Image (cartoon, rainbow, N blue to C red):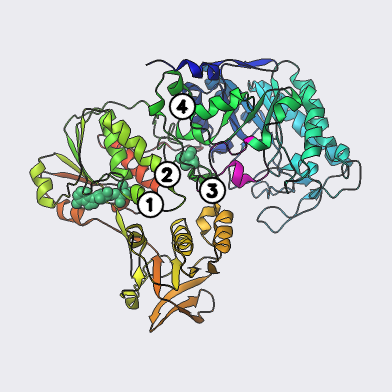
Amino acid sequence: MTMDPRFAILFEPVKIGPVTAPNRFYQVPHCTGMGYSYPQTLVAMREIKAEGGWGVVNTEYCSIHPSSDEMPAHSCSLWDEGDVKNLAAMSEKVHKHGALAGVELWYGGQRAANHHSRLPGLAPGSMPATAAPWQSQKMDAADFKTYRQWHAAAVRRALQAGFDIVYVYAAHTYLLAQFLDPRVNRRDDAHGGLLENRSRLYREVIAETREILADKAALATRVEVTDEDETGAEDRAELLKQIAPDIDLFDVTVPDYSREMGPSRFIKEGALEADITHVRKLTGKPVVSVGRFTSPETMLAQVKRGVLDLIGAARPSIADPFLPNKIREGRLDDIRECIGCNICYANDGLGVPIRCTQNPSMGEEWRRGWHPERMRPARTKDSILIVGAGPAGLDAALTLGRRGVPVVQAEASRELGGRVTRETRLPSLGEWVRVRDWRVHQIGKLENITVYRESPMTADDVRDAGAAHVVIATGATWRRNGLGRSSPVTLPSLDDPRTFTPDDIMAGKRPKGPVVVFDDDHYYMASVIALLLAKEGLPVTYVTSDGIAASFSEHTVEQARTQTGLIAAGVKIIVSHGLSGFAGDTLEIACGFSGNITALPCGGLVTVTSREPNDALWQELKDDTGLRVSRIGDCKAPGIIAQAVYDGHRFAQEFDLSEEEATARRERVVLA
Ligand code: ADP
Ligand code: SF4
């Protein structure tokens, strides 16, 4: 296949000051949960992006001094020679594929809690760190000097490590952004007040960085086009114009992270265009920005309209590290499009390496040796029967097929996709259907996979099928008995026609009002259902056992918009309460602290608690002699879609390995 000539423009080289990017595909700095703690894991992951055709591959935020750490989120660092060595390994691997390597130098200021180093952060004022009851150190004259020395030293180390692009980072509420923002910067000295003063440190750091870099590397800056409260656009424009002569690349964004890192539930592709479209003309310099770009048409349009010179991508490059190569090779239908679920981001905050719902190899490149495109041929070519075609069954089938194994897949219903098909019919979750669609399409290209729809399998059917190895991928069912995180026991009174589960709602059943939706799951399901029912006109009370609505979605940058949306839809929110059960006409809930009971009027209850594995088939078959039986995905351990995909993938990658061979490598220091 060949490239559509219209897309040739995306593969034009772009001059960025003294260096030239080989094409317009630019992997912006993005966190990985790896940082300085997992250098080998990081190098392997970044290399694959370069191999997949990204013309520029950046690090995540890279701390310039121990007084800037956001543990448990792992950042890179350029504090010493050891860091230089580790990051040189990354730039070397990126260069091997003809790409440029960039580094985003970072200082957290008042925001970073420095849990690890226990040093106070330097900042414009003495203010509380994010989620920690301690404050930063207000910078005095000596601190300014010290900070600039740290930054300069990190710039020199960046050059030593072989980076082609070095960032002065003035966004995302970190130090330089704190100085720029008039609401955060309350100083009344030469660094506060007018824009000229607020931008002084930023301009000084740019000038010093420029001097050190000379023409050895490009100077990029990541900066927002307004202040944190979305005012100050004129001041920002003036500033960007002022600094432009020293800047080789503007990486521009908006302060609302839930828009920049917009989850697909709330934000569509290319959402920043109107905010940043002026920067290119204003500065006369190349511009990059993000927008969850997965469509080559959108990319093309942005370049043609003169909005962007480089297509910035974090998530699209995570979901498909080979996206650029696929466009170049005319394989658009092979692009594994990001679904905008933000699970990739969630794990940085949780202190563990990145993962991706769409791309199960993400983060596993080093420890499991997985590659997003190339699979090791299987050792055995005996056919495998997979029962169930949800995300686990589909990924297992595809991966086995790619490894050369003949696969027969039997799915009970007419539609493939299992929970993905059901869930993505709920409002706002539509883009997630890409998990199914990409796999079903890829499976269709492989002759060694046969899929039978409307084929519910009994244990005898499985035995009769004659496969040597059968994989049970039959999913899970939402419980209606109250069992879950906040209740280790079942609640007999819920055995009542007024009780509904998410499966009922997805099947089109509806409770009578007033409705109570009980969220013991803490992710998206309960709030999505509460909103759906409220929009259908039912009076809805949302009760959660946690302290905020949909608390897990804080990790996916969806929480604030979720709770705001519930309030706007008129849903009454009650937090920190567990379910006691029906008592006549009312539903009783109990305060998680005092145990005090509140009775709510309730015509219908939707329990979003936990799920029961559909493992009857597994139980029946597991001890059959002569049959090798495995179970994967939700029927083994119910979880989020990313886990089902991953578990199906892991099975398919490892079913022919010994336990020892399948043990993931660990990245840690072993004492001599
Ligand atoms: P997972 O997330 O683990 O992939 P899902 O619940 O999404 O699980 O998918 C399970 C799929 O298995 C569903 O599409 C369901 O129709 C199918 N299934 C369940 N039991 C059987 C069975 N006995 N025979 C065939 N397919 C089944
Ligand atoms: Fe996209 Fe979700 Fe993968 Fe992140 S985890 S890259 S949002 S598909």
Mark 2 or mark 1: which comes first in sequence?
A: 1
Q: Please give the range of residues in magenta.
A: 253-273
The disc at residue 323 is 4
What secondary structure characterizes most of the magenta part? loop
Q: Is mark 3 on a helix, strand or loop?
A: loop
The residue drawn where x is 54% and y is 20% is 10
Residue 7, compared with residue 648, is above or below; it is: above
Residue 407, compared with residue 548, is above or below; it is: above
Would you call the spot at circle 3 few (<14 residues within 10 Å), some (14-19), or many (20 or more)? some
The quarter of the picture where residue 146 lies is top right
The residue drawn where x is 68% and y is 50% is 113
Amino acid under label 3? Phe
Q: What element carries label 4?
A: helix
Residue 513 lies left or right of residue 130; in this view the side is left
Q: Name the residue under label 3.
A: 266
Q: Name the residue under label 1.
A: 423
Q: Residue furthest bottom?
A: 584
| Residue 169 on image: x %, y % | 71, 35
Residue 261 lies left or right of residue 525; in this view the side is right
Q: How far apart are marks 2 and 3 (CA)?
A: 13 Å
The disc at residue 432 is 2
